[in-house]
Image (cartoon, helix red, strand yellow):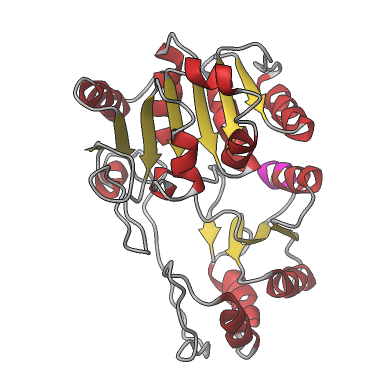
Amino acid sequence: MKLFDHQLTLKSDIYKAWQRHRNVMAVLPTGGGKTVVFSDVIKDCDRPSVAIAHRQELVGQMAMALARQGVAHRVIGPKSLVKLVVSSQIEELGTHFHNPNARCAVAGVDTLIRREKEMGAWFNQVGLWVIDEGHHVVRSNKWGTATTLFPHAYGLGVTATPTRADGQGLGSHADGVFDTMVEGPQMRWLIDNKFLCDYRIFAPPSDLDLSTVNTTAGGDYNPKKLKTAVQSSHVIGDVVEHYLRIAPGKQGITFATDVDTATDIAKQFRAAGVAAEVVSGTTPDAVRAEIIRRFRRKELQQLVNVDLFGEGFDVPGIEVVS
Protein backbone atom coordinates (compact mmCIF):
# COMPACT_ATOMS: atom_id res chain seq x y z
CA MET A 1 0.00 0.00 0.00
CA LYS A 2 1.49 3.32 -1.09
CA LEU A 3 1.10 6.30 1.25
CA PHE A 4 -0.17 9.65 -0.01
CA ASP A 5 2.15 12.62 0.26
CA HIS A 6 0.44 14.05 3.36
CA GLN A 7 0.73 10.65 5.06
CA LEU A 8 4.41 10.38 4.14
CA THR A 9 4.98 13.86 5.57
CA LEU A 10 3.30 12.92 8.85
CA LYS A 11 5.34 9.72 9.03
CA SER A 12 8.53 11.70 8.44
CA ASP A 13 7.53 14.17 11.17
CA ILE A 14 7.02 11.27 13.60
CA TYR A 15 10.54 10.01 12.96
CA LYS A 16 11.97 13.51 13.37
CA ALA A 17 10.14 13.89 16.68
CA TRP A 18 11.57 10.56 17.91
CA GLN A 19 15.06 11.97 17.48
CA ARG A 20 14.42 14.21 20.48
CA HIS A 21 11.45 12.64 22.30
CA ARG A 22 10.34 9.23 23.54
CA ASN A 23 6.57 9.29 23.11
CA VAL A 24 4.91 11.10 20.19
CA MET A 25 1.27 11.99 19.56
CA ALA A 26 0.36 12.13 15.83
CA VAL A 27 -2.81 13.95 14.82
CA LEU A 28 -4.74 13.39 11.60
CA PRO A 29 -8.47 13.95 10.97
CA THR A 30 -10.96 11.11 10.76
CA GLY A 31 -10.52 9.43 7.39
CA GLY A 32 -7.05 10.90 6.88
CA GLY A 33 -5.32 7.52 7.18
CA LYS A 34 -3.97 7.24 10.72
CA THR A 35 -4.09 3.44 10.64
CA VAL A 36 -2.27 3.36 7.30
CA VAL A 37 0.46 5.63 8.66
CA PHE A 38 1.12 3.72 11.87
CA SER A 39 0.97 0.38 10.04
CA ASP A 40 3.73 1.63 7.78
CA VAL A 41 5.72 2.73 10.82
CA ILE A 42 5.32 -0.73 12.33
CA LYS A 43 6.36 -2.31 9.03
CA ASP A 44 9.66 -0.40 9.26
CA CYS A 45 10.33 -1.45 12.86
CA ASP A 46 13.06 -4.07 13.25
CA ARG A 47 12.26 -4.77 16.90
CA PRO A 48 9.20 -6.37 18.52
CA SER A 49 6.23 -4.02 18.37
CA VAL A 50 2.65 -3.91 19.58
CA ALA A 51 -0.41 -2.02 18.36
CA ILE A 52 -3.04 -1.48 21.05
CA ALA A 53 -6.77 -0.67 20.94
CA HIS A 54 -9.70 -1.05 23.30
CA ARG A 55 -12.34 -2.96 21.31
CA GLN A 56 -12.22 -6.07 19.20
CA GLU A 57 -13.38 -4.16 16.09
CA LEU A 58 -10.43 -1.79 16.38
CA VAL A 59 -7.97 -4.61 17.12
CA GLY A 60 -9.30 -6.37 14.03
CA GLN A 61 -8.92 -3.22 11.94
CA MET A 62 -5.31 -2.80 13.05
CA ALA A 63 -4.63 -6.42 12.15
CA MET A 64 -6.26 -5.90 8.75
CA ALA A 65 -4.17 -2.78 8.10
CA LEU A 66 -1.01 -4.73 8.86
CA ALA A 67 -2.18 -7.58 6.63
CA ARG A 68 -2.70 -5.15 3.74
CA GLN A 69 0.92 -4.11 4.23
CA GLY A 70 2.00 -7.76 4.21
CA VAL A 71 3.12 -7.61 7.86
CA ALA A 72 2.91 -10.88 9.79
CA HIS A 73 1.44 -10.36 13.27
CA ARG A 74 0.18 -12.23 16.27
CA VAL A 75 -3.03 -11.43 18.12
CA ILE A 76 -2.82 -11.13 21.89
CA GLY A 77 -6.36 -11.97 22.85
CA PRO A 78 -8.90 -14.76 23.20
CA LYS A 79 -9.11 -17.51 20.59
CA SER A 80 -12.43 -16.09 19.39
CA LEU A 81 -10.73 -12.82 18.46
CA VAL A 82 -7.91 -14.64 16.66
CA LYS A 83 -10.52 -16.58 14.69
CA LEU A 84 -12.35 -13.39 13.72
CA VAL A 85 -9.11 -11.70 12.62
CA VAL A 86 -8.09 -14.66 10.48
CA SER A 87 -11.51 -15.11 8.87
CA SER A 88 -11.81 -11.38 8.09
CA GLN A 89 -8.43 -11.32 6.40
CA ILE A 90 -9.18 -14.42 4.34
CA GLU A 91 -12.52 -12.91 3.28
CA GLU A 92 -10.89 -9.67 2.06
CA LEU A 93 -7.41 -10.77 0.99
CA GLY A 94 -7.78 -14.45 0.20
CA THR A 95 -5.14 -15.28 2.82
CA HIS A 96 -4.15 -14.20 6.33
CA PHE A 97 -1.04 -12.84 7.99
CA HIS A 98 -1.59 -14.14 11.51
CA ASN A 99 1.50 -15.83 12.90
CA PRO A 100 1.66 -16.69 16.62
CA ASN A 101 5.46 -16.29 16.51
CA ALA A 102 5.49 -12.94 14.70
CA ARG A 103 7.61 -10.06 15.98
CA CYS A 104 4.65 -7.68 15.68
CA ALA A 105 1.51 -8.03 17.82
CA VAL A 106 -1.94 -6.47 18.00
CA ALA A 107 -3.72 -6.47 21.31
CA GLY A 108 -6.57 -5.20 23.43
CA VAL A 109 -5.43 -2.99 26.27
CA ASP A 110 -7.22 -5.01 28.98
CA THR A 111 -5.70 -8.28 27.75
CA LEU A 112 -2.19 -6.81 27.86
CA ILE A 113 -2.58 -5.67 31.44
CA ARG A 114 -3.94 -9.06 32.52
CA ARG A 115 -0.98 -10.86 30.93
CA GLU A 116 1.78 -8.76 32.47
CA LYS A 117 3.26 -11.60 34.50
CA GLU A 118 3.18 -14.30 31.84
CA MET A 119 4.46 -12.04 29.04
CA GLY A 120 6.85 -9.83 31.00
CA ALA A 121 9.95 -11.08 29.17
CA TRP A 122 8.45 -10.22 25.77
CA PHE A 123 7.25 -6.84 27.03
CA ASN A 124 10.86 -6.00 27.88
CA GLN A 125 11.89 -6.72 24.28
CA VAL A 126 9.27 -4.46 22.68
CA GLY A 127 10.83 -1.47 20.95
CA LEU A 128 7.63 0.27 19.82
CA TRP A 129 4.11 0.58 21.13
CA VAL A 130 1.33 2.22 19.14
CA ILE A 131 -2.03 3.19 20.65
CA ASP A 132 -4.98 3.91 18.40
CA GLU A 133 -7.28 6.69 19.68
CA GLY A 134 -4.37 8.03 21.72
CA HIS A 135 -6.46 10.68 23.45
CA HIS A 136 -7.44 7.96 25.92
CA VAL A 137 -3.95 7.84 27.41
CA VAL A 138 -3.30 9.49 30.75
CA ARG A 139 -0.90 8.14 33.33
CA SER A 140 -3.59 7.31 35.90
CA ASN A 141 -5.77 5.07 33.70
CA LYS A 142 -5.37 1.63 32.13
CA TRP A 143 -3.88 3.15 28.99
CA GLY A 144 -1.15 4.81 30.99
CA THR A 145 -0.61 1.52 32.81
CA ALA A 146 -0.23 -0.26 29.46
CA THR A 147 2.53 2.10 28.34
CA THR A 148 4.57 1.26 31.45
CA LEU A 149 4.62 -2.41 30.43
CA PHE A 150 7.22 -1.61 27.76
CA PRO A 151 10.14 0.09 29.53
CA HIS A 152 12.49 0.02 26.51
CA ALA A 153 10.02 1.14 23.84
CA TYR A 154 9.31 4.29 21.92
CA GLY A 155 5.65 5.26 21.91
CA LEU A 156 3.23 6.51 19.28
CA GLY A 157 -0.33 7.61 19.89
CA VAL A 158 -2.62 8.51 16.99
CA THR A 159 -5.84 10.46 17.18
CA ALA A 160 -8.08 12.91 15.38
CA THR A 161 -9.00 14.66 18.63
CA PRO A 162 -6.03 15.42 20.93
CA THR A 163 -8.18 16.77 23.76
CA ARG A 164 -10.18 15.29 26.62
CA ALA A 165 -13.58 16.34 27.94
CA ASP A 166 -12.45 15.80 31.54
CA GLY A 167 -9.79 18.50 31.23
CA GLN A 168 -6.79 16.22 31.80
CA GLY A 169 -3.75 16.94 29.66
CA LEU A 170 -2.19 14.40 27.30
CA GLY A 171 1.34 15.80 27.57
CA SER A 172 3.97 14.23 29.83
CA HIS A 173 4.31 17.63 31.52
CA ALA A 174 0.69 17.30 32.64
CA ASP A 175 -1.42 14.16 33.13
CA GLY A 176 -0.38 12.18 30.04
CA VAL A 177 2.62 10.38 28.59
CA PHE A 178 3.30 12.16 25.31
CA ASP A 179 6.37 14.36 25.03
CA THR A 180 5.45 16.14 21.80
CA MET A 181 2.75 16.31 19.12
CA VAL A 182 2.96 16.33 15.31
CA GLU A 183 0.03 17.32 13.14
CA GLY A 184 -1.05 16.40 9.63
CA PRO A 185 -3.37 18.49 7.43
CA GLN A 186 -6.75 19.73 8.63
CA MET A 187 -10.03 18.14 7.55
CA ARG A 188 -10.92 21.03 5.22
CA TRP A 189 -7.63 20.55 3.35
CA LEU A 190 -8.38 16.83 2.94
CA ILE A 191 -11.85 17.66 1.61
CA ASP A 192 -10.64 20.38 -0.75
CA ASN A 193 -7.95 18.06 -2.11
CA LYS A 194 -10.42 15.20 -2.69
CA PHE A 195 -9.12 12.83 -0.02
CA LEU A 196 -12.44 13.11 1.84
CA CYS A 197 -15.92 13.85 0.57
CA ASP A 198 -17.69 16.98 1.75
CA TYR A 199 -20.64 16.72 4.09
CA ARG A 200 -24.11 18.15 4.65
CA ILE A 201 -25.62 18.56 8.11
CA PHE A 202 -29.37 18.46 8.76
CA ALA A 203 -30.69 19.53 12.17
CA PRO A 204 -34.47 19.08 12.15
CA PRO A 205 -36.46 20.50 15.06
CA SER A 206 -36.97 18.12 17.97
CA ASP A 207 -38.90 17.99 21.23
CA LEU A 208 -35.98 16.29 23.02
CA ASP A 209 -35.55 18.21 26.29
CA LEU A 210 -32.05 18.00 27.78
CA SER A 211 -32.50 20.75 30.35
CA THR A 212 -32.70 18.26 33.23
CA VAL A 213 -29.88 16.01 31.98
CA ASN A 214 -26.64 16.73 33.78
CA THR A 215 -23.18 15.80 32.51
CA THR A 216 -20.69 13.43 34.11
CA ALA A 217 -17.13 14.27 35.15
CA GLY A 218 -15.99 13.07 31.73
CA GLY A 219 -18.22 15.57 29.95
CA ASP A 220 -20.87 13.08 28.75
CA TYR A 221 -24.58 13.19 29.46
CA ASN A 222 -25.80 11.17 32.44
CA PRO A 223 -26.86 7.85 30.79
CA LYS A 224 -29.96 7.19 32.93
CA LYS A 225 -31.32 10.72 32.65
CA LEU A 226 -30.56 10.83 28.94
CA LYS A 227 -32.48 7.58 28.39
CA THR A 228 -35.49 9.02 30.24
CA ALA A 229 -35.35 12.23 28.18
CA VAL A 230 -35.13 10.31 24.89
CA GLN A 231 -38.03 8.01 25.75
CA SER A 232 -40.14 11.01 26.75
CA SER A 233 -39.65 12.59 23.32
CA HIS A 234 -40.47 11.69 19.71
CA VAL A 235 -36.83 11.47 18.68
CA ILE A 236 -36.97 7.71 17.96
CA GLY A 237 -39.66 8.16 15.33
CA ASP A 238 -37.96 11.32 14.09
CA VAL A 239 -34.78 9.39 13.26
CA VAL A 240 -36.59 7.01 10.92
CA GLU A 241 -38.83 9.70 9.41
CA HIS A 242 -35.95 12.03 8.57
CA TYR A 243 -33.80 9.19 7.22
CA LEU A 244 -36.60 8.24 4.82
CA ARG A 245 -37.07 11.88 3.81
CA ILE A 246 -33.43 12.97 3.52
CA ALA A 247 -31.34 9.87 2.81
CA PRO A 248 -33.54 6.98 1.68
CA GLY A 249 -31.64 3.90 0.62
CA LYS A 250 -28.27 5.11 1.87
CA GLN A 251 -26.13 3.02 4.20
CA GLY A 252 -26.05 4.54 7.64
CA ILE A 253 -25.10 4.24 11.25
CA THR A 254 -27.49 5.43 13.94
CA PHE A 255 -26.34 6.17 17.47
CA ALA A 256 -28.64 5.34 20.37
CA THR A 257 -28.39 6.11 24.08
CA ASP A 258 -29.11 2.57 25.31
CA VAL A 259 -30.03 -0.90 24.11
CA ASP A 260 -33.78 -0.47 24.67
CA THR A 261 -33.83 2.70 22.58
CA ALA A 262 -31.64 1.09 19.90
CA THR A 263 -34.03 -1.86 19.73
CA ASP A 264 -37.00 0.49 19.28
CA ILE A 265 -35.23 2.44 16.52
CA ALA A 266 -34.22 -0.73 14.65
CA LYS A 267 -37.77 -2.05 14.94
CA GLN A 268 -39.16 1.14 13.41
CA PHE A 269 -36.57 1.03 10.63
CA ARG A 270 -37.58 -2.53 9.76
CA ALA A 271 -41.28 -1.61 9.88
CA ALA A 272 -40.50 1.06 7.29
CA GLY A 273 -38.78 -1.47 5.04
CA VAL A 274 -35.21 -0.56 6.01
CA ALA A 275 -32.95 -3.53 6.84
CA ALA A 276 -31.53 -2.75 10.28
CA GLU A 277 -29.82 -4.51 13.17
CA VAL A 278 -28.75 -3.52 16.69
CA VAL A 279 -25.17 -3.92 17.88
CA SER A 280 -23.84 -3.08 21.32
CA GLY A 281 -21.24 -4.17 23.83
CA THR A 282 -23.64 -6.92 24.98
CA THR A 283 -23.95 -8.45 21.49
CA PRO A 284 -21.92 -11.71 21.36
CA ASP A 285 -18.63 -11.25 19.50
CA ALA A 286 -19.39 -13.66 16.67
CA VAL A 287 -22.89 -12.22 16.15
CA ARG A 288 -21.56 -8.65 16.18
CA ALA A 289 -18.86 -9.52 13.65
CA GLU A 290 -21.36 -11.18 11.32
CA ILE A 291 -23.74 -8.20 11.50
CA ILE A 292 -20.89 -5.85 10.59
CA ARG A 293 -19.88 -8.12 7.70
CA ARG A 294 -23.49 -8.03 6.43
CA PHE A 295 -23.38 -4.24 6.62
CA ARG A 296 -20.11 -4.17 4.65
CA ARG A 297 -21.74 -6.41 2.03
CA LYS A 298 -24.66 -3.94 1.91
CA GLU A 299 -27.14 -6.55 3.08
CA LEU A 300 -28.07 -4.10 5.86
CA GLN A 301 -28.87 -0.42 5.43
CA GLN A 302 -28.68 0.58 9.07
CA LEU A 303 -26.52 -0.36 12.04
CA VAL A 304 -28.11 0.97 15.21
CA ASN A 305 -25.37 0.98 17.83
CA VAL A 306 -24.82 1.77 21.47
CA ASP A 307 -21.33 3.01 22.44
CA LEU A 308 -19.53 1.01 19.75
CA PHE A 309 -18.78 3.20 16.75
CA GLY A 310 -18.08 6.55 18.38
CA GLU A 311 -14.45 6.40 17.31
CA GLY A 312 -12.19 4.47 15.01
CA PHE A 313 -14.77 2.36 13.16
CA ASP A 314 -13.64 2.01 9.55
CA VAL A 315 -16.36 1.36 6.96
CA PRO A 316 -15.82 3.52 3.86
CA GLY A 317 -19.32 2.70 2.57
CA ILE A 318 -21.07 4.72 5.28
CA GLU A 319 -23.15 7.43 3.62
CA VAL A 320 -25.21 8.86 6.46
CA VAL A 321 -24.95 9.13 10.25
CA SER A 322 -27.79 9.88 12.64
Write the start and end of the magenta stretch as one range: 293-297
Q: In which quarter of the image is residue 277?
A: bottom right
Between 267 and 139, the residue placed more toward the observer is 139
Residue 253 horizontal/vertical position (percent): 59, 58
Q: Does the magenta stretch include residue 66?
A: no
Q: Percent position (x, y) of residue 45?
A: 42, 13
Total number of numbered discs in the rendering: 0
211 relative position to 232: left or right: left
The residue drawn where x is 53% and y is 26% is 65
Q: In which quarter of the image is residue 80?
A: top right
246 is higher (above) or lower (below) than 133: below
Q: Mark yes or no: residue 98 visible.
A: yes
State the residue at coordinates (54%, 66%): 322
Q: For residue 71, which quarter of the picture?
A: top right
Q: Residue at x 73, y 28 (%)?
A: 82
Q: In this view, does 74 lie to the left or right of 195?
A: right
